Image (tube, rainbow, N blue to C red):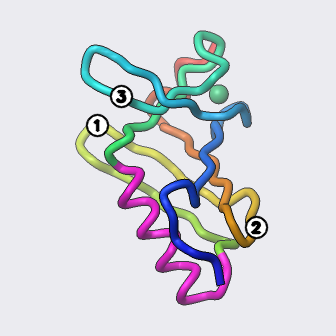
Amino acid sequence: MAKKSWDYLNLVCGNCGSPLTIQKGEWGTFYACSEYPKCYNRFTTNLYELLLDKVYDHVLKHGHAKNFKWNVRRSRLHAVVQTVKETDQQVTLSVLNVAFAKKRA
Ligand SMILES: [Zn+2]
């Protein structure tokens, strides 16, 4: 069984598949697609811990993170999170912020 740790999740862009990296903006840190400005996909860092709990609960219940899907709606944020890959140490999730995805070039 996988051990829950801070780096248990690997986040990739649900729009283009590139890694999501932590960026600093005027309102604090956030995850942004490494293909910015070609891709506008982004995700708030303060949901990471909640996401980690959700994924780990799924793993405890089902024994794996396959089929994990989370539709997050928080005020203006609407993101869809899905498992794309899983190993014992890490789950790779695609994260698509629906609002920002529409802005892609
Ligand atoms: Zn992207």
Does the magenta segment cover residue 72? Answer: no
CA neighbours of label 1 inside 10 A, class few (<14), some (14 to 19), many (20+) = few
Q: Answer with the quarter of the image where residue 24 lies.
A: top left
Direction from residue 32 to residue 34 in the image, left or right = right
**Label 3: few (<14), some (14–19) or many (≥20) C-alpha neighbours in 10 Å:** some
What amino acid type should be assigned to the residue bearing mark 1?
Arg
Mark 1 vs mark 3: in front: 3
The amino acid at mark 2 is: Thr
Q: Main secondary structure of the magenta part?
A: helix
Q: Position of residue 92 (x, y in %)?
A: 67, 55
Q: Residue at x 28, y 25 (%)?
A: 28
**Vertical placement of residue 80 versus 14, above or below:** below
Q: Are marks 1 and 3 in contact (CB under 8 Å)?
A: no
Q: Closer to the camera: disc 2 or disc 1? A: 2
Disc 3 marks which residue?
29
63 is higher (above) or lower (below) than 87: below
Q: Please report the residue visible at 54 percent of the width from the left and 20 percent of the height from the top.
A: 40
**Front residue (pair 98, 22):** 22
Residue range of the region highlighted in magenta in the rendering? 47-64
In the rendering, at what x and y percent does residue 26 appear? 27, 14
Q: Which disc number belongs to residue 35?
A: none
Q: Position of residue 71 (x, y in %)?
A: 45, 57
Residue 76 tag number: 1
Residue shown at 67% from the left, 34% from the top: 19
- Say how many tags the image has: 3
**How far apart are the alpha carbons under marks 1 and 3?**
17 Å
User: What mark, if any, has residue 87 been given in the picture?
Assistant: 2
Classify the position of the C terminus by image quarter. Answer: top right
**Three-letter code, disc 3:** Thr
Q: Is residue 62 magenta?
A: yes
